[in-house]
Image: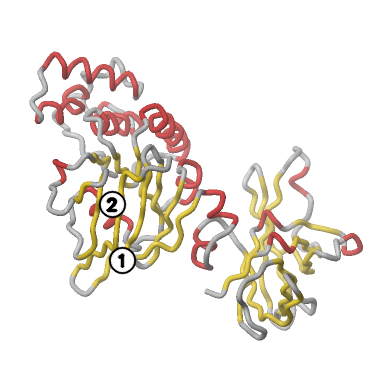
Amino acid sequence: MNRSILQLKGISKNYGTLEAIKEIDLNIFEGEFFSIIGPSGCGKTTLLRVLAGFEMPDSGSLYIENINMQNVPPNKRPINMVFQSYALFPHMNVLDNVAFGLRVDGVAIGEQTQLVKSMLSLVKLSGLENRLPHQLSGGQLQRVALARALIKKPRVLLLDEPLSALDAKLRNEMRQELIRLQKSLGITFILVTHDQQEALSMADRIAVMNDGTIQQVASPSYLYEFPSNKFVADFIGSINFIECQLSEIDGDIFKFITRISKDAFTVEGNKSLRIGQDCWLGIRPEKISFKDSDVVNPHHNKLSGVVTNITYFGQASMYHVEVIGEKTATINVMENHSQRSSYATNKVGDSVVLCWSTESTSVFTS
């Protein structure tokens, strides 16, 4: 997965005074499942439409397989797209919907039928050729849209929020189906979604966008564990932020003071920080554990507080712990339920000691 199939160089797109995307540089590899995520209005859909050719950038260059796509219309690009609304023809049955692109290209009827049956088998819709869209479930509609997009064998498939209309159980099933299809076909998939879990569970790499720019591109695990800034850390998963100030540097050990604890917090690293600089410490809820105060590792950070609320998720519980110092803060702690009786470790009103390692702590200056 090291040959670029799609390259963006300085791509920008404006709508009047609105800068939708700004100086985007990005390489996407052949055979990669790539995802673009970000909050509403961040520019991810505009970027997808530029890739498809539905929008022309105001500046920059787009290359697909080293061919400049300037002035190349959508139907001439080696790209196809699955829309959020599926965009199926309501008066056509499944077979005709899937075969539509082949007919436009003048493919012979006999070859059309053979290709459609093969594709319907791939997406597990064999036997439904004669059904109309209104006779299909949400998952089946999604599969028809996928089959129609894939039958022309695009080099790149664009997916615009394809699972947003499905219920939670079906959405999870379709995630696995998309992964299976992408791996079996070897086509580059580019998924645009606002659902972080969707991207984390499916993509090989993820681009996080905000305010028209790409904040970070990385694998799901690296993005989660080593976010490049406070926005990425906050958008990907759940995280606690503690306002702090750098008070001391001792080799690779940084010490921070806060207004929620008399104890200094320590972090390992070699960031280019200066004494007195204001920062945020970031700690994922699952990295924090409950400990007895007399057994806390001296190399770990700790806080004392009171459990104010518990949110039960089935496989885990989120404990909301109020910490009172010069300033009051709420720290969230995620505890997995390894046994059926483990859900009641602490109760609302309990005084607790929170503990986490120095290496589990991130530092952000922006």
Q: Bin the neighbour count of mark 2 within 10 Å (Cα to Cα): few under 14, some 14-19, many 20 and up.
A: many
Of residues 39 and 81, the one nearer the viewer is 81
**Figure check: 93 above or below 261:** above
Residue 213 occupies which quadrant of the picture? bottom left
Q: Residue at x 39, y 62 (%)?
A: 214
Q: Residue at x 43, y 29 (%)?
A: 180
**Residue farthest along the right direction in this orientation:** 294
Could you tell me how far apart the alpha carbons at marks 1 and 2 are, in whole angstroms?
A: 15 Å
Q: Residue at x 66, y 78 (%)?
A: 244
Could you say whether the residue bearing mark 2 is in a helix, strand or loop?
helix
**Figure check: 8 above or below 102:** below
Residue 342 occupies which quadrant of the picture? top right
Asked whether, in this view, residue 119 is left or right of residue 71, the answer is right
**Figure check: 161 above or below 111:** below
Q: Residue at x 19, y 65 (%)?
A: 58
Which residue has dot 1 on it?
Answer: 23
Asked whether, in this view, residue 10 is left or right of residue 200, the answer is left
Residue 30, how many percent across, how many down?
36, 40
Could you say whether the residue bearing mark 1 is in a helix, strand or loop?
strand
Q: Nearer the viewer, mark 1 or mark 2?
A: 1
Quadrant assignment for the N terminus: top left
Type of amino acid under label 1: Glu
Type of amino acid under label 2: Leu
Identify the mark nearer the N-term, 1 or 2: 1
Which residue has dot 2 on it?
Answer: 48
